[in-house]
Amino acid sequence: MNGKLFFRLGIAPTVILTVILTVILVSTVVYWRTGEESPAPLPPPPSVATPNEPVADRVYPKADDNYLIATSKIGGTHYAIGIGIATLVRVKLIEAESVSMSALETVGPEENIDLLLSSEAQFAILPAQAGYQAWVDGESFDRDDIRATLRSMTMLWENVAHFACRADAVQTGSLSDLALLKGSAIAFVRPEGGTLDSTRMIIESLGLDMERDFQAVKTTKEEGASALLNGEVVCLSLPTLRADQAVSQALEGGAKLLNITEAEFLAADNGRSLWTRYVVPEGIYPGQIAAIETMAQASFLAVRADIDPNHVYRILTEIFDKIGFMRNIHIAANAMSLDRAPTGLPVPLHPGAVSFFQDRGIDVPDRLLP
């Protein structure tokens, strides 16, 4: 591991130490409050290998090495979830498997993929869009390296597409209303740790161009909501968690959320399996008197293909057996569930993840098999 990573891990040592200690304390309190004793070490899972390649013949990082999970900026969702996963690994697996993990602050998905390719990080949290583009487009990374290295483990949370527009700009109440707003100012907010590429795909599926057909205001969600309320823009596009405060602010000011019809959803996804249908139930937002049908895109846990399948299996076991712990870490983890774990993954699963899901009775789509 090079000095650059040690330097980055030491960017804010007191912050990281405080967060880790707090998380461990929360874990202890949760166990105490539920009367649950610390579980005994799990029995070894069945050995898993890639087809025609026995586990014994594989070369893995040494078990006593400290795995790194690449996240994003300190204070964001990616970093918080990364801290939660790393803490579970350190607390639950260090004795049983000599496996430890630390969360690494990064500038975002492109760097995370670079770190995976160089083996400086072994795990990473990525937006599905970033994983898909790396796997399919091959513009920023060598495609052969990506396909030999990048694997997925599980969906972590979903960024829900919110299109909030001024009431007087809403005609049909569906996404197609954007076509009637050519030349208007629209605020576009990128998802945390991601880019506007996913929103751009949705806009292009309508036969529109974000920059050519609109006065595109690229901004933060708080500034975008304020601009909508102040009449500076007619719509706000915001991929975010459900029940987001900025969306609530916009709707309190009289804005309306657009529905995305089944036809619009299919056109936007265009067979990529990047998006899933998503329903925002009635009453989640102020003045929302009916459910909103929209779409969502995952952020997922990525892993190098050469990581020991047994370690991947055990890490997933801890994540889903301690899902309440993860939900105490960050509200984004409320979206995590075993049934939806393979949802919206853009690259094949790691063999250890395939074994885990099959053992739990979860169907794995053929497109995700290694």
Image (cartoon, helix red, strand yellow):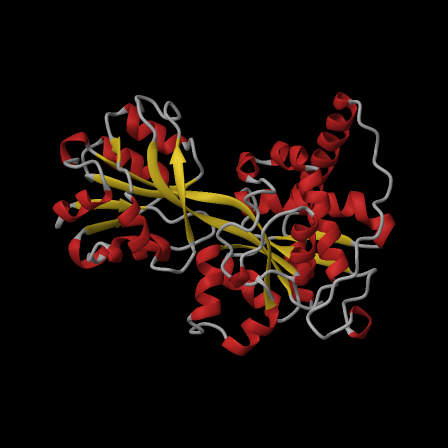
Residue at left 61%, top 48%? 362
Please provide percent x and percent y for residue 224.
30, 39
**155 to the left or right of 267:** right
Please provide percent x and percent y for residue 56.
82, 71
Residue 21: which quarter of the image?
top right
**Is residue 196 positioned above or below 15 on the image?**
below
**Is residue 33 positioned above or below 96 on the image?**
above
**Is residue 94 positioned above or below 307 on the image?**
above
Please provide percent x and percent y for residue 314.
75, 51
- Depth check: give the residue in front, 209 or 277: 277
**118 to the left or right of 241:** right
Residue at left 27%, top 49%? 263
- Depth check: give the residue in front, 111 or 40: 40
The C terminus, quarter of image: bottom right
Residue at left 72%, top 46%? 317
Q: How many marks?
A: 0
The N terminus, quarter of image: bottom right
